[in-house]
Amino acid sequence: MTIIDWHQRAKEVDFTISHLIDGEQIALTLGDAILKYAPRDGSLLYQLSKGTPAEMERAVASARQAYQDKRWRGLPLHQRQAALRKLGDLVDEQQEIFALYESLDAGKPITQALGEVTMASDMLREAADGADKLFSAYAADGAYCAYQLRKPVGVVGAIIPWNYPLVIAALKIAPALIMGNSLVLKPSEHTALSANYLVSLALEAGIPPGVLNLVHGAGPTVGETLAHHPDVDLLSFTGSTATGKKMQMAAGQSNMKRLLLECGGKSPYIIFDDCPADLDTLAADIVGTAFQNQSQNCMAGSRLLVQDSIKEKLLPKVIEQTKQLIPQDPLDPNSTFGAMIHEAHMNKVLAYIDSGEREGATRIVGGKRVYVDTDAEGSEGFYIEPTIFDNVNPQQKIAQEEIFGPVLSVLTFNTEQEAIALANNTCYGLAAYVATENLGRVQRLSQEINAGTVMFMSTFAPVESFRELGKEGHRESGFGIEGGLMGLMSYSLSTTVHHWT
Ligand code: NAD
């Protein structure tokens, strides 16, 4: 097996970034630039423009024109499927460059980034595979028959965050396009690279110009324009709950566009004393779920709710395994824990750590910024040690708010009812993880916990089943299913036809 020198590869990377409008790459106007610093060493990586409302207007007009003249939705489904499958294959062919972009841009360990590229390419192909399964529902009775048409929604605006830039771009592009919509994508201003490269491959895959557009820039400039645009029919948003609420306002103030909102979370990992006996494996699962992607993960299990009777046996194992997670240069193939996305975010996470101490919780692991050796001179990347607080009060900020950084809060309970009450004691409802071997409890908790996804016994559910079943948030984690066949429904409209012959 060839060993890749990722540091050398990083020196050869092309950082050219442009909008894609109507199939043309449009240079950014850099007057009012956003400076992008590399999470791994703090060096200036590239510059991005904030973008202008006029650029977004052009992109929406291009998507509308492509929708109206049916250059894409008018194609037979098998042709749209072929194009999406080819785009997936092109992504696989460029796996290393995509992974490098993700690692440099978001500070993620390179081996993790390689896996995420495959996840994105699979999503593109699977949407293609799923689409023809939706067109078969009908009922017939003599001279009467009824069936349901699935139609594209029209022009889709997609606004995405920085934590899984390529995967979330694919998660939106795949269902939107296979259902026949046109799309305008706005990536996060903190991670422009992989989406930029992905859309550049669209024409080669057979997706006509104007069908897939991309405008880079800041939320308050191009993001607002897209969210308020009267000619956008569906806004598919992934990001924070605070911005998600703005999207609801924008939809209401403009054309009542449909919304798909995938927002924040504060997910509990609940441990009962009837959990599996192998506490080392369970601790590895807890640590993996809490700290994967430096905990910049909407579904992070950031609250450990542990039954009093088992805490003494379990917690030392969680501590021991957390201490083995050492922040390392993401370009090092052995790295399993990388950097925070940017300096301001790192400081926000450190402020949460301060608040945990001020409000009386006990810090038992980590808690500090660390400096990591990279190949850059004077390297000052944005790294924080994985951190655990014990004796956390349920009302504390670190138990209530989404930190989106490596801070695990430990809380205790005695009864199942107390566990459910604690689990539901935030405004969020994205995911929950439960360790128990009691099947009755499995039934009760899946019904009682406010969460769109509940995982029992292990969080390592096969990634395919995630993609096939889709997921949605409850409460202030958002609404609308993304992924799988149900996710294709989210990007389409129904017309029910009742027909007498
Ligand atoms: P964010 O809300 O700050 O930004 C998300 C996107 O919205 C970015 O592209 C940003 O430019 C844009 N934006 C910001 N303000 C805007 C405005 N006023 N109008 C229009 N667009 C605007 O979120 P983030 O910091 O990029 O991402 C982290 C958040 O995303 C976390 O809360 C995380 O839980 C959430 N997230 C949720 C899921 C999920 O599936 N539920 C998945 C990934 C991330």
Image (spheres, rainbow, N blue to C red):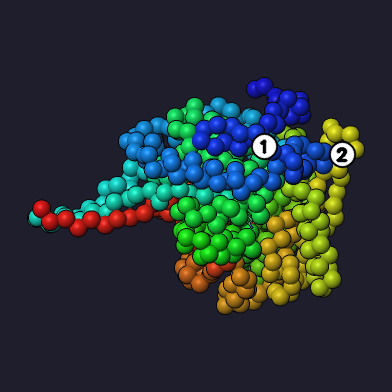
Q: Can residue 201 be seen in this view?
A: yes
Q: Is residue 127 visible?
A: no
Left or right of 475 in this view: 126: left
Quadrant location, ligand no. 1: bottom right
| Marks 2 and 1, the one that precedes in the sequence | 1
Q: Which of 356 and 276 is in front in this view?
A: 356
Instruction: Give the residue drawn at x 69%, y 38%.
Output: 29
Q: In this view, does 392 lie above or below 335?
A: below
- Residue 464: where, in percent of width, then height? 49, 45
Residue indicated by mark 1: 28
Query: Does the closest atom of ligand 1 sit within 8 Å of the Cβ of label 2?
Result: no
> Disc 2 vs disc 1: which is toward the camera?
1
Q: What element carries label 2?
A: loop
How many other residues sit within 10 Å of disc 2, few (<14), some (14-19) or many (≥20)? some
Amino acid type at mark 2 = Ser
Instruction: Give the residue drawn at x 56%, y 65%.
Output: 249
- Residue 450: where, in percent of width, then height? 54, 69
Q: Which of 188 and 311 is in front in this view?
A: 188
Tell me the CA gap for discs 2 and 1.
28 Å
For this orientation, the residue located farthest to the right is 378
- Residue 206: where, in percent of width, then height? 44, 29
For this orientation, the residue located farthest to the top is 2
For this orientation, the residue located farthest to the front is 54
Q: Is residue 227 above or below residue 274?
A: above
Quadrant where the N terminus sits is top right
Left or right of 462 in this view: 192: right
- Label drawn at residue 379: 2
- Residue 291: where, in percent of width, then height? 70, 53
Q: In this view, does 377 lie above or below 143?
A: above
- Label drawn at residue 455: none
Q: What element carries label 1?
A: loop
